[in-house]
Each structure stands twice: as C-alpha cells, then as structure tokens.
Amino acid sequence: MDIKPLRYFVTLAQTRHFGRAAALLHISQPPLSRQLAALEADLGVRLVERSPHSVTLTAAGERFYGDARAILAALDQARSNARAVASGVAGTLTIGFTMCAAYSVVPGYARRFGSKFPEVTLNLREVVSNDLSAQVLNGQIDAAILFPGTNERGLASRMLISEPLCVALSREHPMARSRTLKIARLAGQPFVLAATEVAPTLRAAIMEHCRSSGFEPDIRFEVQLQQTVLSLVNEGVGVALVPASMSKVQLEGVVFRKLENAPLVDQVLLWSSANRNPCLQTFLDMV
C-alpha cells in the first residue's frame, strides 16, 4: 500500500507551505512537488493553488484533505488492530470448563483477564467434562479447565488448583450437626456420585478414600453434573463428596462439612499444542 502521496498531501494541507511541509517530512521540496503532481494527475483534479509564499486548497482539495485524513486514520487503526491481534491483546478466546471450575478458578480468571485485556472477547462455555478434550482437539474451544485424566496426543496441560473434598449433606441429615466428619461415618450411607466417564479422577479419589476406611460406598445415583449431585443431596436421597469450592453453591437444604484427612483433587488447564491463537498464549502467560 503506497500511502506516501496521501501523507505528503495531508502534511502540505496542514502547513499550507511547501518548505515547512518538506521539512516536517524530512525531504526536499522537489520530491514533494512531484508526489503532489502525480496525485493530482491520478485524481484528475487540481488540489492546491500555488503562490510564491503559500498554498491554498481548492474546493476539491478541501474535500480530499478530509477524506485523506480519515483514510490515514483508518489505516493506522487497521495496522494497530492487526498488531494487537498478532500479539494476543485483541481477538477472541474460548474456554470450556466444568461446573466445579465455575466455583473455583473461572470467575477470578475471567475478571483478571477481562480487566487486563479488554480488547479480547472471552467466551466461557460450561461443558460436561468428557466432551472437553475432544472440543480442544477439534478446535471448538481454545482451552479447557477440568479434572485431569486425559492423555491424548497433542494436548498440553498445567495444574491450576488442588483442593480438598468435603461432605455435602441434607440439612436434615443427623450428621449435619457435626462440623467435621470422618469418612468411616459415611459407611452404609447412600452416595450420589458423578459417573466415571464424566470425572474419572474425581470418582477414583472418592472410591479410594472410602476403601481406605474399609468400605465400598453404596452408590445409589450416578449423574453427569455436580449441580445434579447437589440437587439430589438437597432432596435428602443421599450424601456426596465434592470439591470444597462447591460449597459456594447456595442450596437451602444442603450443608457442607469438612472431611477429616480429605484427599485433594486437582483441576488443570488443557490446550492443544497445535493451537496458534495468540490470545491463548496471552491467557497461558496470565495463568
């Protein structure tokens, strides 16, 4: 894009003097005169009236001056926009996450990223966890926040948070009066758990902790979403072990109690190593 003639003309129109315009452009007057003559020839109109000491814009020159300034401003903005997108400070980033992440790291990341990079459109999608790795691989989303467990080729991960499990009980449950519970006290209780295919590492942590106290949990309900787990607990049909951040969920009939010697569960950020979205790298740097 040869925008030199436009810049020369705008500078001349602003100074109304060939000598001063040439000095601002760091050129001599002859090249400026040649560029102006070529521009007028290209347009087929006279843009300026010359006199020994000054320059006067014609009516066509006044109009072209305004339009040329707008064109140059738009080109400068386009250049700035392209550089911003290439550097990851503008564009679009899509993050998928599980419900647990919605109550742990997602709100803080959204606030910090949105504040620091307001030119990036951050799309957040709550998804069942067994779909997330596939969506990352096929490019539907740029990254995912979920429980670890997938080892598919082409995926990279980074741990974000490690938190203890806690006990979710109906407010009417006899154990709800205890502030801290041992896992052994839950032997024989009906359990509500997320299905293995949805959250295998969470499920494994719960099963192992129960078995370490010598019992197999009596699993009455297997569901897809943590919200459903808590809804069933709210109805008093079972108890559940959930990540501690889920205690932020406000359900009138559910209480959360600390679990003695609680196992820790991780949540990780997952992304494709082939993803070339500059905004993804910006997000990774922030994390």
Image: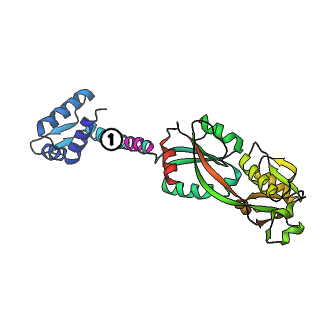
- Measured from the top left, where is residue 126 in percent x and y? 68, 47
Q: Main secondary structure of the magenta part?
A: helix
Return the residue nearer the eye: 117 or 63. 117
In the image, residue 67 sits, relative to residue 181, either above or below, namely above
Frontmost residue, 27 versus 179: 179
With 160 as the anchor, is 200 left or right in this view? Answer: right
Residue 231 is one of the magenta-drawn residues: no
Magenta stretch? 77-85
Residue 29 vertical placement versus 160 (above, below): above
Residue 199 at least partly seen: no
Callout 1 amino acid: Leu
Q: Where does label 1 land, which residue?
A: 72
Residue drawn 27% across the image and 29% down it: 43
- Dot 1: element: helix
In the image, 265: left or right of 221? left
Q: Residue at x 83, y 55 (%)?
A: 231
Find residue 28 and report its horizontal and vertical position in percent. 12, 40
